[in-house]
C-alpha cells in the first residue's frame, strides 16, 4: 500500500464531479483547507468545516444521504474510522447509505503528530467488518477509475489516501 495517492490528487480528481453535481456536499473534519480551497471558495453553500466532530459528521452525512444529497466526508483516517465507527456502522452501513468517506493520512502519514494520528493499515481491517462498504486504496494508476467507481457505487465507500 506504499504507493497510495495523495489527498491532493484524490480531491483534484473528484472536483469536476463535485462541481457539476449540486447534490454533492463536502463535510471536512477541520483540515485540508489548502487541498480543499476550490471546494470552499467556489461552493461555499455546500462545503462545510464540521470541526473535530467525526461522530456528528458521520451522522450528518447519513441524514443528508437520506434526503437525497450525496455527502462526501474528508477527515483523518483514525478519527473518521475509529472515533466515528459506531456511526459509520449503524447510521451509514446498516442503511446502506450513499455516503463517501475519504480518509487522509493512511499508513502513518501523520506520524510526526503522534500515535493518535496513525493506524498502520488497521483502518482496512476495521472498515472491512462493515458489509456494505466498498474500500478503495487508489494509486496514481487507478485514481481515475477509483473515483468513478466510488461515485458510481450505490452505497457507502471508504477511500484511503496519504
Image (cartoon, helix red, strand yellow):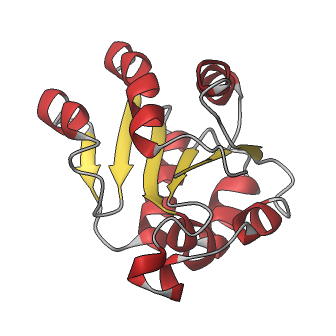
Q: Is residue 112 left or right of residue 33?
A: right
User: Which quadrant of the figure has residue 21?
Assistant: top left
- Residue placed furthest toward the top: 20
| Residue 100 coordinates in the image, percent (x, y) | 57, 42
Which residue lies at the image location 44% right of the left edge and 59% below the top edge?
A: 75
Q: Quadrant of residue 20?
A: top left
Seen at 58% across and 43% down, the residue is: 99
What residue appears at the point 44 percent right and 33 percent down from the top-left corner?
A: 9
> What is the number of callouts on the image?
0
Task: Let me know if residue 69 appears in the view.
Answer: no
Q: What residue lies at 83% left-to-right and 59% top-to-bottom?
A: 128
Q: In the orientation shown, which residue stands out farthest toward the left?
A: 41
The answer to whether residue 45 is left or right of residue 55 is left
Q: Residue 62: where, in percent of width, then height?
A: 54, 52
Nearer the observer, 5 or 75? 5
Instruction: Determine whether, in the image, residue 111 is placed left or right of residue 157.
Output: left
Where residue 60 sits: x, y (%)? 43, 57
Of residues 104 and 148, the one drawn nearer to the viewer in this rendering = 104
**Does any portion of residue 151 appear in the rendered image?**
yes
List x then y, in percent, for residue 111: 48, 76
Residue 114 against residue 142 in the figure, above or below: below
Amino acid at each position: 500500500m506504499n504507493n497510495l495517492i495523495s489527498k491532493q490528487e484524490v480531491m483534484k480528481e473528484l472536483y469536476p464531479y463535485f462541481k457539476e453535481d449540486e447534490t454533492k456536499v463536502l463535510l471536512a473534519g477541520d483540515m485540508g483547507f489548502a487541498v480543499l480551497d476550490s471546494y470552499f471558495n467556489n461552493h461555499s453553500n455546500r462545503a462545510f468545516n464540521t470541526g473535530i466532530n467525526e461522530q456528528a459528521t458521520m451522522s450528518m452525512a447519513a441524514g443528508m444521504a437520506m434526503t437525497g444529497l450525496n455527502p462526501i466526508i474528508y477527515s483523518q483516517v483514525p478519527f473518521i474510522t475509529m472515533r466515528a465507527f459506531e456511526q459509520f456502522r449503524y447510521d451509514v452501513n446498516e442503511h446502506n447509505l450513499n455516503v463517501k468517506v475519504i480518509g487522509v493520512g493512511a499508513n502513518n502519514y501523520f506520524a510526526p503528530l503522534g500515535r493518535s494520528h496513525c493506524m498502520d493499515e488497521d483502518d482496512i481491517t476495521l472498515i472491512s467488518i462493515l458489509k456494505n462498504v466498498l474500500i478503495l486504496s487508489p494509486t496514481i494508476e487507478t485514481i481515475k477509475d477509483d473515483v468513478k467507481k466510488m461515485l458510481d457505487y450505490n452505497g457507502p465507500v471508504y477511500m484511503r489516501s496519504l
